[in-house]
Image (spheres, rainbow, N blue to C red):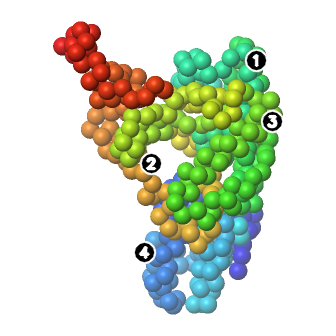
Amino acid sequence: MDITASELSLGKEKYTVIDIRREDAFAFGHIDGAVNIPSDLFNDCSDADSYRALFAEYDIPDDSVPVICCRIGRLSETIADALCDAGIRAYSLEGGYASWLCASLDDTERADKVEKSIQKKFHKVLWSRFAKAVLTYKLISPGDRIAVCISGGKDSMLMAKLFQEMKRHDKFPFELVFLVMDPGYSPENRAIIEANAKMLSIPITVFETDIFGSVYNVKNNPCYLCARMRRGHLYNKARELGCSKIALGHHFDDVIETNLMSMIYGGQVQTMLPRIRSANFPGMELIRPMYFIREADIKHWRDYNKLHFLQCACHFTENCSSCDQNGQTDSKRLEMKQLIAKLAAANPQIEQNIFRSMENINLHSVLSYKTDDGVHSFLDDLDTPDFSSSTL
């Protein structure tokens, strides 16, 4: 049996929402009061007694009706049906967490509150750092028309609001296009992005591609190929709309994680630059104005305003049958995030030191480095007076 998000909110009966998604997805966002019981724990249940024993472990009241919730309402139907077959009345939340999320975003008055939080409570850690990156790296010039690229996650949505705030300051003339590329989102994910944009008063321009379909059957590095294709489509659409720059929502933590990944897994020293000229789209640039903003502060802003955004919307995680696989848990980026957190627990300066290391490279103290002219070795200058004195 199914129950809708609106019926659930009426509370005609005593319900307990049982969220069967992975723990990390549940932690990212869930229905208030929901209890997380990952779906694989239901595999060991075969009758009413075993189901009730499982519920007892998680303190589910005996007199409440379980409402099973997955991401988009597919796996939850299977488990709810199994409960009913065992003699336990249960419902599946129609449309899953995505459906509930869309219903909760129908509040256009919240945009003003969100904007005030940026201006006041989060002024120092969000707005000031955004403005600092723009000024430090000369990311915006008078007359620019910038495509603010929105993926639907917390980072790009915040970036859009920060750009709107900068526009209000009116220091110099520039134009904005809030660009959303639909690479093949499910209807549920597309609806969440559009609902969030409407609620936050972000006038988005949406265009469609079939990137997810193109990379779905690619076995080797599908995420890398997808990212490259998405970047190309964004450049192309932005240029078509008269823009000379695209803005992406990478933040400080992305930067330092990339630094470590390039060394540990790429065997090179390469950073995520705040400003890049496109090689394939002449006259176009990519900018990263959230370069100095910490991810923890973005999460704090999101949670303070009770905002809910997409965690991951690709085809590899959109089907409930695949929601319980490891997904991003095994990603190299997550490994870097965990490593940095462990090091920072012992030394709070670790993050800043990783960042500063990319600003303080001494070419006389590295084995070799590359330029357009080729590879240069320390041996090339070893016998010169300048090199000798620099290493004393």
Quadrant of the rendering where the N terminus is positioned: bottom right
Residue 335 seen in the figure? yes
Q: Which mark is residue 240?
A: 3
Mark 2 or mark 3: whose residue is earlier in sequence: 3
Q: Earlier in the sequence, mark 4 or mark 3?
A: 4
CA separation, marks 3 and 1? Answer: 17 Å
From the viewer's side, name the closer residue of 388 and 31: 388
Q: Amino acid at mark 1?
A: Gly
Disc with the residue nearer the chain's start (4 vs 2): 4
The image quadrant that residue 190 belongs to is bottom right
Would you say the residues marked 1 and 2 are in contact, meaning their CB atoms lie under 8 Å apart? no
Q: On the image, numbered disc 4 is attached to which residue?
A: 57
- Is residue 268 shown above or below 44? above
Report which residue position mark 2 lands on: 333
- Is the residue 321 above or below the residue 105 in the image? below
Which label sits on residue 4? Answer: none
Dot 3: what SS? Answer: helix
Q: Position of residue 117 (x, y in %)?
A: 62, 31
Q: Is residue 281 left or right of residue 289?
A: right
How far, Cα to Cα, is label 4 from label 3? 57 Å
Say which label, 3 or 1, has the lower sequence index.
1
Residue type at numbered disc 4: Glu
Q: Are marks 3 and 1 in contact (CB under 8 Å)?
A: no
Residue assigned mark 1: 143
